[in-house]
């Protein structure tokens, strides 16, 4: 019965993706006047893509999303790694206080940050800038990254660190040469904001936008599928 239910849900998901893919080949007139189930009579894919670029600059939105995601993730992981290592293995005062202070960024509703961040960014000249967006994405990712890394670092035996220090390794060398390799997983307007501006005037263009913005996520999952599976197996143990 579980497989039957999962198969039914999979068919629903596949149908919605297939509908979006087919609709992206239709022109606005063909979509509005045609039947819901009709196959595309022509190929208006490039026309829809040109309209997307003219109306919302979707390629620029995809580039901005990629830039913010990559830089924000890199900076967040780097900072969170240092914080997690210090809290879990270095001799610092008030470890739990520092942990709760950083992790509290995930406790409060995200909406309460919006007005203070907007005012702060406006005064600092960071509003509507790439630097401001990268800083924002970095800041909101640090607490959870630190939480995950700290829990993993606590599971690493102190004897390993002590042996490395006996051999002459410093704290930073222990982090880089021991903790980071062990922590490796077994496994401007962003594009979604830009797509939200389309409305429902031209549904085929909207369907094409949905397909385009889904490609990076699907490709990333397919490329890292084995890592996800290994991660799930590791966590279940």
Image: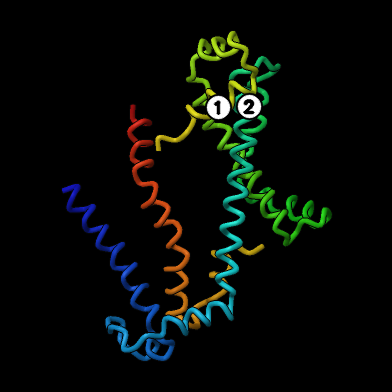
Vertical comparison of 159 with 209: above or below: above
189 displayed left or right of 163? right
Vertical comparison of 214 with 42: above or below: above
Q: Quadrant of the C terminus?
A: top left
Q: Residue at x 59, y 74 (%)?
A: 57
Q: Mark 1 Cα within 10 Å, few/some/many (few <14, many 20+)?
A: many
5 displayed left or right of 205? left
Q: Residue 108: where, in percent of width, then height? A: 62, 41
Vertical comparison of 15 with 8: above or below: below
151 displayed left or right of 101? left
Q: Secondary structure at mark 2?
A: helix
Q: Residue at x 51, y 26 (%)?
A: 151
Q: Residue at x 42, y 68 (%)?
A: 211
Q: Nearer the viewer, residue 170 or 10?
A: 170
Q: Residue 188: where, in percent of width, then height? A: 67, 62
Q: Residue at x 61, y 22 (%)?
A: 173
Q: Decide: marks 1, 2 in contact (CB < 8 A)?
A: yes
Q: Residue 18: where, in percent of width, then height? A: 31, 70
Question: How many discs appear?
Answer: 2
First in residue order: circle 1 vs circle 2: 2
Q: Nearer the viewer, residue 177 or 100?
A: 177
Q: Mark 2 Cα within 10 Å, few/some/many (few <14, many 20+)?
A: some
The residue to which callout 2 is attached is: 99
**Res. 142 image quadrant:** top right
Which residue in the rendered view is the most extreme toward the front? 167
Q: Secondary structure at mark 1?
A: helix
**Res. 83 image quadrant:** top right
Q: Residue 198: where, in percent of width, then height? A: 54, 76
Front label number (1 vs 2): 1
Inter-mark Cα distance, 1 to 2 = 9 Å
The residue to which callout 1 is attached is: 150
């Amino acid at each position: 019965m579980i497989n039957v239910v999962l198969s039914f849900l999979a068919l629903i998901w596949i149908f919605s993706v297939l509908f979006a893919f087919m609709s992206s080949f239709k022109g606005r007139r063909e979509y509005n006047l045609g039947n819901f189930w009709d196959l595309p009579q022509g190929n208006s894919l490039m026309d829809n893509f040109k309209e997307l670029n003219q109306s919302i600059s979707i390629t620029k939105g995809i580039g901005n999303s990629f830039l913010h995601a990559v830089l924000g993730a890199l900076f967040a992981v780097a900072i969170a790694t240092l914080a997690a290592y210090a809290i879990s293995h270095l001799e610092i005062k008030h470890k739990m206080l520092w942990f709760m202070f950083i992790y509290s960024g995930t406790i409060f509703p995200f909406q309460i940050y919006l007005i203070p961040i907007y005012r702060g960014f406006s005064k600092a000249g960071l509003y509507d800038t790439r630097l401001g967006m990268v800083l924002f994405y970095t800041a909101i990712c640090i607490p959870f990254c630190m939480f995950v890394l700290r829990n993993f670092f606590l599971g690493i035996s102190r004897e390993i660190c002590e042996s490395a220090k006996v051999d002459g390794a410093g704290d930073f060398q222990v982090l880089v040469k021991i903790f980071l390799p062990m922590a490796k997983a077994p496994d401007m307007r962003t594009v979604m904001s830009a797509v939200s501006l389309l409305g429902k005037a031209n549904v085929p263009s909207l369907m094409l936008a949905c397909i385009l913005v889904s490609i990076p996520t699907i490709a990333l999952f397919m490329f890292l599928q084995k890592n996800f599976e290994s991660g799930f197996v590791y966590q279940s143990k």
